[in-house]
Amino acid sequence: MSSTVQLFVTCLVDWLRPEIGIATVRLLERAGITVRFPEAQTCCGQPAFNVGRWEEARAMAEHWVRTFDPELPVVAPSGSCVAMVRHGYPALLEGHPLYDRWKALAERTYELSQYLVEVLGITDLGIRREGAVTYHPSCHLLRMLGVREAPERLIRAADAAYHPLPEAETCCGFGGLFSVHFEEISGAMLQRKIQAIRSTGAPIVLGCDWSCLMHIGGGLRRHGLPIQAMHLAEWLAGER
């Protein structure tokens, strides 16, 4: 098993919440992993892919595949972007000269908690946190990557009071551009998620995708609720 990984930081983290990327590096280094950052990386192409702009998405997929080394694992603090690489790229690269390189990369591309728990076998990073938290499992992480237990195992190992979220597997309503094109439906889904979060009594809701956490956090602020939406990596690394 390689002791070196490549960080796929993702667009939203890079542009809007770089602290998550810093926290990801700190957690990986705590686990004894050396982290490389391919500076040529850009968007994985998921927004373009989801609205049918496949030519633009294909160009971004080609660049992504060329940027990362298929000999080393790729780790990202986002289940959504990893799901795009693993499950969206086949539609874009079938029959493409880069297909075999993509396949080798896809087999070694992981979401952060997935890599720590399922690949490295680490469930306790020796980190302890006080207070109470709940956890929202994002759709792509749960459904497309099948990552169900890894985040909760890391949370429970930190000794915080863990309050399970009612209807945890119900979508928060973000869905990328879905929340823009179907604002009313998205808002109704978010309202239901916020009610579930409030019912736990936890002052922090954790997640593994900053996209969903931005959506949830915005709703919490608009309601004037003293509940913080926070990425699992930041919480574990003590970044906030």
Image (cartoon, helix red, strand yellow):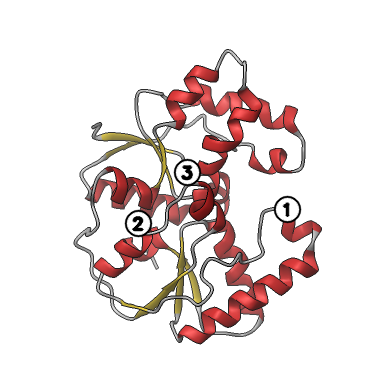
Tell me if mark 3 has few (under 14), some (14-19) or many (20+) residues whose alpha carbon lies within 10 angstroms of its own. Answer: many
Tell me, yes or no, whether the two marked residues, 1 and 3, touch with CB atoms within 8 Å: no
C-alpha gap between disc 1 and disc 3: 20 Å
Question: Which quadrant of the view contains residue 1?
Answer: top left
Residue type for callout 2: Ala
Q: Secondary structure at mark 1?
A: loop
**Left or right of 164: which side holds 126?**
left
Q: Secondary structure at mark 2?
A: helix
Of marks 1 and 3, the one in the foreground: 1
Residue type for callout 1: Leu
Percent of width and height locating residue 126? 19, 62
Which residue was labeled with disc 3? 9
Percent of width and height locating residue 30? 23, 51
List the single residue furthest toward the top.
97
Which residue was labeled with disc 2? 150
Q: Quadrant of the C terminus?
A: bottom left
Q: Secondary structure at mark 3?
A: loop
Percent of width and height locating residue 58? 67, 27
Task: Name the one closer to the observer, 112 or 88.
Answer: 88
Residue at figure coordinates x 62%, y 21% from the top left: 94
Residue 38 vertical placement versus 193 (above, below): above
Mark 1 / mark 3, whichever is N-terminal: 3
Task: Name the one closer to the observer, 14 or 193.
Answer: 193
Which residue was labeled with disc 1? 177
Residue at figure coordinates x 48%, y 19% from the top left: 101
Residue at figure coordinates x 47%, y 43% from the top left: 9
C-alpha gap between disc 2 and disc 3: 20 Å
